[in-house]
Amino acid sequence: MNITVIGTGFVGVVTAAVYASFGHQVIGLDIDEQKIASLKKAKVPFYEPGLEELLQQQLAANQLNFTTNYETAIKNAQLIMIAVGTPSAPDGQADLRFVFASIKSLAPHLKKDAIVAVKSTVPPGTLNQVETLIGQHTKVNFYTASLPEFLKEGSAVDDTLQPDRIVIGANDQHVFTVLETLHQPFKTSIVKIKPESAQMAKYAANAYLATRITFINQIADLCEKNGADVQDVVAAIGLDSRIGPHYWYPGFGYGGSCFPKDVKELAAYSRAIGESNNLFNKIDDLNEERIPKLMQAVENKVGGWSDKTVAVLGLSFKPNTDDLRESPATKVIPLLLNKGAKVKSFDPMASWQSFFQLKALEPNHTQEKNIPSAVKNADVIISLVEWPQITGFDFTRTKLNKKQWFIDARNQFQPAVLKQAKYHYQGLGRG
Ligand code: UDX
């Protein structure tokens, strides 16, 4: 099949490479010339395990091409997937201007009977607007679909190659038939539903997972006060087959490019349709309040930040990615600096300076190349992200002969081992 993917951000590049690997002729389209030039050399501006290798293979096999030219990319395409960004508008709802701009640019070049499928996360009702807009710019027959994306950063290639499910939202049997046939080689469940249901499924999945994380974070806060250990609570409840053992890891709140944005969007969408008093607004508030609240508790424990050297370990929002969007470090580090601490950070992959581009490191913040130099002289060590390089490090070797706090924000360490090494250990919900 001739497939064009519009938008070569995270989702677009992974999608283009994976569908090419299934033997389709894929074109990745973006208006950013520089991005396209580097993608043609299999270079991506972010770290995602296995992606550059897959790009190299597919480019070499001529299954995959990249262009900035709409006519070239669209005129032979049987399926066009829209994977452009949907940033948040000031009222919190999804800003769809890039979706509509790409639709206007592609529509005049559409081949007869092409399917335009929206992968970007958009609110229910958007496909009707897309359909009207295309109709205004073409005379050929066309179809539309909603194809929400569920991949996770850090395992995006595997998630796309082996998805838990493919959700196809459409109003037309022809679209279901074509897209079902396309996805049969993925050997997974295919859910065929209305576009509005597909769009709600995407928001519901992310909002549910964000709720689950917020729930266990709240349980951890209670455990902290009553002497229970949240890890034991998780082990106990996880054996209930209705609950399950996964995705229950407490921490400094959820981050990344999806959960915070999608929950805010669902909350704003709820408000816009008159459902303001629902769970999603509360979940968002609780997540926003989490880091200031936890950091205040840590500050009280360590006795203020003004004279402290703090090692912050883990800058990305989770392991196996260099993405700092909504990462705990982006909130913790400014807070520490504002309160007069000296910060030494470390991350195996993410760079603070390149993420914030022109904004140089603050005078009191240095990003160190390894853990030993980050923890040198530290009064407080905060392990924020469960990178294996951090959780596998033997901190008993670097213990200094002075009072040192160890804040285990993801409960990844053995409290007894660190306490025996004379750290003042503080996990989450380990009362
Ligand atoms: C998420 C969804 O999982 C994915 O299906 C969707 O398409 C995009 O959003 P991603 O943001 O890449 O993917 O990461 P994920 O691994 O789900 O983690 C999101 C956030 O939740 C991270 O900040 C992570 O640290 C946090 N988290 C996750 C917890 O705090 N506890 C958990 O138990 C799990």
Image (cartoon, helix red, strand yellow):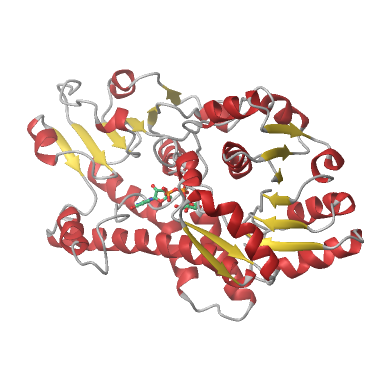
Question: Count the marks: how many?
Answer: 0
Q: Is residue 374 left or right of residue 276?
A: left
The x, y position of residue 338, in whole percent, is 45, 39
Image quadrant assignment for residue 57: top right
Q: Is residue 257 left or right of residue 171?
A: left
The x, y position of residue 214, in whole percent, is 36, 61
Q: In this rendered view, identify the residue nearer to me: 15 or 75.
A: 75
Q: Decide if residue 147 is in sight here.
A: no
The x, y position of residue 153, in whole percent, is 48, 42
At 21% from the left and 58% from the top, the residue drawn is 234
Q: Is residue 12 above or below residue 200?
A: above
The x, y position of residue 162, in whole percent, is 45, 47
Q: Is residue 403 left or right of residue 27?
A: left
Please identify the residue farthest to the bottom as the structure is shown: 274
In which quadrant will I find the C terminus?
bottom left
At 67% from the left and 33% from the top, the residue drawn is 64
At 35% from the left and 32% from the top, the residue drawn is 313
Q: Decide if residue 202 is in sight here.
A: yes
Q: In this rendered view, identify the residue nearer to me: 364 or 247.
A: 247
Q: In this rendered view, identify the residue nearer to me: 405 or 341.
A: 405
